[in-house]
Amino acid sequence: MNWEIIATIVEAVGAVAVVVTLFYLALQIRQSTIQARRSELDASMDHSALARMAIAENQELAEIWLAGLTGDGTLSESRQLRFDALVSQRFWALFHVYDRVNSGVMERSFWQGASQQLEDLIARPGAAGWWHNNAQQFPQHYVDEVERTINRVAKDRTE
C-alpha cells in the first residue's frame, strides 16, 4: 500500500473526527446555554417570589406593605424599616430581571412583564419615595430605566 494513500485516509478520518467533535461541542454549548437560561429564570422567579410570599403569608407584613405604599409617614420606625426591606427586595428583584434581559440571558418579553410591575410599584408614593432616597445603590443603567419609567408614569397621569 502506498504511504500517500494511507496519509490521505488518515487525514480524511482526522477531518471527519474534527467535524464530529465540533458538532458535539456545539450541541453541548447549546444545551449548557439552555440550562443556564433556565437556571437564571428560576433564580429570578425565586428572588421575585420572596417578598410576595412573605406578604401573602403574613398579615402584619401585608398591612405594613399597604401602609408603606401610601407614603403618608404613619409607619412606626420599626415598621418603616420592614417596609424599606420589602420595597428594596422588590426593586432588586426587578433589577435582576432587567439585568438578565439586557445581558441576553433572558428573553426581552420577560422585561415587558417586569416593567409593568415596576410601573405599578413606582406609581405608589411610598415606593417612589424609597426609590428617590435609595436609587444610588443601583447600577446607573437601571437607575436610568427606572427614571424613564417614572417619567412615563407621570406623563400618563397628566394625560
Image (cartoon, rainbow, N blue to C red):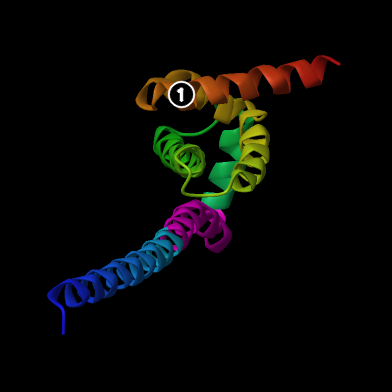
Give the residue displayed 30% in from the left and 69% down from the top: 21
**Location of residue 88 in the rendering, given as x and y in whole percent from the top left corner:** 44, 37
Q: Quadrant of the N terminus?
A: bottom left
Which residues, given as a range, are shown in magenta?
37-60
Secondary structure category for the residue under label 1? helix
The outermost residue toward the left is 3
**Location of residue 93 in the rendering, given as x and y in whole percent from the top left corner:** 47, 44
User: What is the crowding at mark 1: few (fewer than 14 residues within 10 Å), some, or many (at least 20)?
Assistant: few
Q: Quadrant of the C terminus?
A: top right
Q: Is residue 130 magenta?
A: no
Q: Is residue 46 above or below residue 147?
A: below
Q: Which residue is mark 1?
A: 141
Q: Nearer the viewer, residue 154 or 61?
A: 154
Question: Where is residue 40, by image quadrant?
Answer: bottom left
**Location of residue 5 in the rendering, given as x and y in whole percent from the top left corner:** 22, 75
Q: Nearer the viewer, residue 77 or 82?
A: 82
Give the residue displayed 39% in from the left and 67% down from the top: 23
